[in-house]
Image (spheres, rainbow, N blue to C red):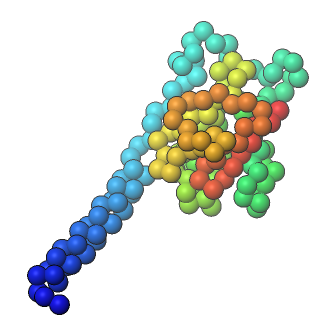
Amino acid sequence: MPEGVLTVLKFCFLALVYLFLWRIVRTVAAELRPSKTLVPVAAMAADAPAPAPDSRRGRRWEMVIVAPPARAGETFSLGEELTVGRAPGCAVVLADDTFVSQVHARLFARGNDPYVEDLGSTNGTTLNGDPLLEPTRLRRGDRVQFGETVMELVR
């Protein structure tokens, strides 16, 4: 092969190595960056009443893990707020799911309505298969995916 072609191939290889390293550094920096400040529910809807049990049935909303099978059936009651992530301080700790950020998302209530919000996670959060771009109201049967973990909203 001509020497000029080998030189071009060397530069292309070096560019790919640097691109790979840049992606790794960017991902690590995103994980180390402080998570978004959690906005209190009262600040988001000052006129909304405090979260309370559903007056029709006297029960709170619950999130049930449906996948992976090893954790299926675990239930979490949605009070004021649940944080989801790998960090030990989260209400729902998904330490075994490597696609979940330290503080990945939060589930919260405005009045009697449940909402989900992605907190700038690396891999994002999906609601019924669609990427979550802003705090979104949940309805019974909605499925929220954090990494490889899927939770469903039930009563």
| Nearer-the-camera pick, 3 or 73 | 3
Rendered location of residue 63, percent (x, y): 74, 40
Rendered location of residue 41, percent (x, y): 58, 22
Q: Look at the image and tell me in which quarter the C terminus lies.
A: top right
Residue shown at 17% from the left, 83% from the top: 6
Residue shown at 69% from the left, 31% from the top: 138
Rendered location of residue 81, percent (x, y): 64, 32
Residue 103 visible? The answer is yes
Residue 84 visible? The answer is no
Q: Is residue 11 left or right of residue 88?
A: left
Residue shown at 56% from the left, 34% from the top: 117
Residue shown at 72% from the left, 37% from the top: 142
Asked if 47 appears above or below 74 in the picture, the reply is above
Rendered location of residue 129, percent (x, y): 63, 45
**Residue found at the far bottom of this picture:** 1
Quadrant location of residue 44?
top right
**Residue found at the far right of this picture:** 57
